[in-house]
Amino acid sequence: MHQDSSSVVGLVGGTGGVGASTLACAVAALAAEVGLSTLLVDLSPHGGGLDTVVGAAHLPGRRWPSREEDLQRLRCSELPTVDGLRVLSHSRRVAPSRTLGGAAVEGVARLARAHDVVVLDLPCPDHPRALAWWHLASCPVLVVGTSPPQVAGALAVRALLPTARATVARTSSGCGLHPGDVSDLLGLPLLARLDHDPSVATALLEEVAPGRAEGAVRDAAAAVLALATGARRGLTSGRRADNGTGDEGRGGEVA
């Protein structure tokens, strides 16, 4: 159920803790920064709310409605907006009262038609409607860790997500695999390498979206946005996906 007039980017983690939500926020913030009308959608009902990550927690506006009839009437103009980025986030004050089911998928598909770019922080595979949300994305990207257990988890997710376009590898110290080898195992092009980026912590403290400052997160966000929109105009991606020695990752070209 792709939206013809929108680029619907979906970020999903091969396991938890690899930075998929942070990267989703950075992609959305960068899209808004370069002048694209952008909507960021939080699909983690039990998380802390992506409005917190992008610096919009203090802003008025609607969060995820708990009733289907409210969702059907939800308008873009009612959502919190920060630096040109609209955010549909979960609230930290009210426990989610329903699963993000069919009505929610249809509601987001409707909102997507009013935006150039929609970024979905996709749910984990154990979510009862995970496949419906994954299918909504026209450009699903798998964010993976490089330790053996993380790669094993990513392989399981990859089997459920045959439409994935590329992978972003979150590197780890110690016994991690080479990012290019991970992409080969997954059968996906290596889009970017996501190294530790100290600017993320600074952004959280300053209550601004991650990826505003130069660094690995901004580079990866630029690569994802370029893949989704088919254009590199106005995007900043200073480093290549490499192994830290100047050699490109062995994952192949991204089509």
Image (cartoon, rainbow, N blue to C red):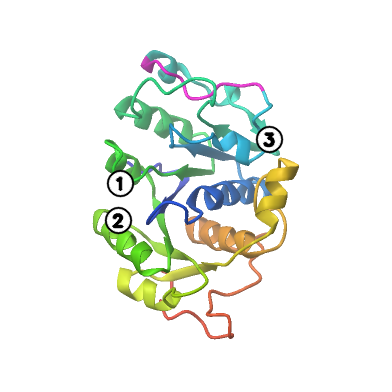
Q: On the image, numbered disc 1 is attached to which residue?
A: 125
**Image check: 100 left or right of 143?**
left
Q: Which residues are magenta?
A: 60-68
- Relative to 196, residue 125 above or below: above
Q: Quadrant of the N terminus?
A: top left
Spatial CA distance of label 2 from label 1 is 7 Å
Q: Secondary structure at mark 2?
A: helix
Q: Position of residue 101 (x, y in %)?
A: 31, 29
- In this view, which residue lies farthest toward the right? 206
Crowding at label 1, few (<14), some or many (≥20) Cα neighbours within 10 Å?
some
Q: Position of residue 252 (x, y in %)?
A: 41, 78
What type is the residue that disc 3 sits on? Val
Nearer-the-camera pick, 228 or 133: 133
Q: Secondary structure at mark 3?
A: strand
Q: Quadrant of the C terminus?
A: bottom left
Q: On the image, numbered disc 3 is attached to which residue?
A: 82
- Relative to 93, residue 223 above or below: below
The answer to whether marks 2 and 1 mark residues whose Cβ atoms lie closer than 8 Å is: yes
Q: Is residue 252 visible?
A: no
Q: Is residue 173 visible?
A: yes
Q: On the image, numbered disc 2 is attached to which residue?
A: 157
The answer to whether marks 3 and 2 mark residues whose Cβ atoms lie closer than 8 Å is: no
Spatial CA distance of label 3 from label 1 is 30 Å
Nearer-the-camera pick, 154 or 232: 154
**Image check: 211 left or right of 120?**
right
